[in-house]
Amino acid sequence: MSRKLATSQYDDLLCRASLADTGTIPRTPPLEESPDVIPVGTAAVLDPKAYFTGNYGKNVAKPVVAEEANLIYVRGKNLAPAVQNGDVYVYWARAEDLDSPSKWQGNQLLTVEGHGSFRLTDVEPGAITVATSAFTWTPDAALEGKSAVLIGVLATNDHPNPVPTLRSPLDFNRWVSKQGGVGAFKTTVVSKPKPDPTVTLSGDFKLAEGGLAEFLVTVTDMPLGTEVSMKLTTPVDGHVISIPQTRITQNPQTIGVSATVPQNYTSQIETRIAPAGSGVPGSNNSVVTRAQYTPPGASGPVRPVLLARYSIHFGK
């Protein structure tokens, strides 16, 4: 004969284990999907109280990024019949270390002001409370692609912070199922975004007479696979004069476009260069943008008139 598991209702500041958690103890799986321990990226929330109260029914966590100062907010709900005060703590652990608290008890995060906890005061019964000062965590590169768990604690006089007294070994999920004031959020640490290698070369162009102009970009001694594009910022009859993104396949290489422009035409010329990820620019490398104009009606060989020339060199 099966015995029904005895349950009780938590009556203090609740930090949910999942969106389905209403405070019944023991909590049931999932136990590492707390919507109340909330990494939000590197930008602070403008009004944490309003934002996290307004979306209490959602999990709004963002990815945790290695080598960046991630901000973590914590919220809870007062299930006690009276006004409650408390303190918020946050820890992080490698997922594989959860059952060995001695490996993560020392991983206590600090708030942006450098404090080890955040004080919650005068939380009315049934009210949602928010630690408006974020905790910070900068995972090192070794955690990229690894699972980590953020552990939030809402401690009160009736339910003090249980983390410092934990002993190894521990069945973490069984333990957290009985802790209404503890929420765990499991996440995968993602890689830090690589900086955009694209360089923009800008310069002015003006043609008083108007007429047919030619725009050329010459790439010399750059790694094959470098990508180059060009555009003029002032449209002509609604059309943008441009050279689409082109992959460099030889050395040197010139790409270009011709267009008729009206009298007194002025524009910025923008050339975008994205050096290939492999290979190193040669010592004589350059990217040169030229704008030239051939006067109409001239007899005999006519040299184009150089109207603008801009160049860049990639070096140490």
Image (spheres, grey):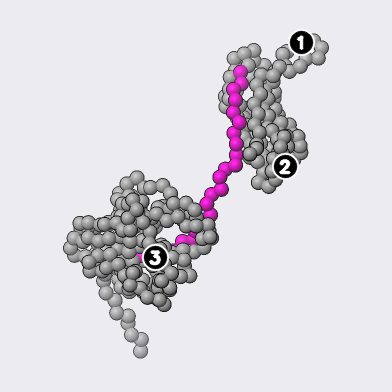
> Could you tell me which secondary element the residue under label 2 belongs to?
loop
The label on residue 106 is 3
The mark lying in front, picked from 1 and 2, is: 2
- 3 and 2 marks in contact (CB < 8 Å): no
Residue furthest left in the image: 82
- Residue on which the image places disc 2: 224
Label whose residue precedes the other's in the sequence (3 or 2) = 3
- Residue 110: image location, x then y, percent: 36, 56
Residue 150 vs residue 178: left or right? right
* Quadrant position of residue 130: bottom left
Residue 15 visible in the displayed image: no
Residue 93 vs residue 122: left or right? right
In this rendered view, identify the residue nearer to me: 148 or 101: 101
Look at the image and give the residue range highlighted in magenta.
Answer: 183-206
In this rendered view, identify the residue nearer to me: 263 or 113: 113
Instruction: Kindly identify the residue that appears in the image at 27 percent across and 68 percent down.
Output: 160
- Residue 92: image location, x then y, percent: 41, 63
Task: Tell me how far mark 1 sits from mark 3, CA to CA.
Answer: 82 Å
Task: Tell me how far mark 3 sits from mark 2, CA to CA.
Answer: 50 Å
- Residue 144: image location, x then y, percent: 53, 59
Label whose residue precedes the other's in the sequence (1 or 2) = 2
Label whose residue precedes the other's in the sequence (1 or 3) = 3
Q: Amino acid at mark 2?
A: Leu
> Could you tell me which secondary element the residue under label 1 belongs to?
loop
The mark lying in front, picked from 1 and 3, is: 3
The label on residue 298 is 1
- Dominant secondary structure, magenta: strand
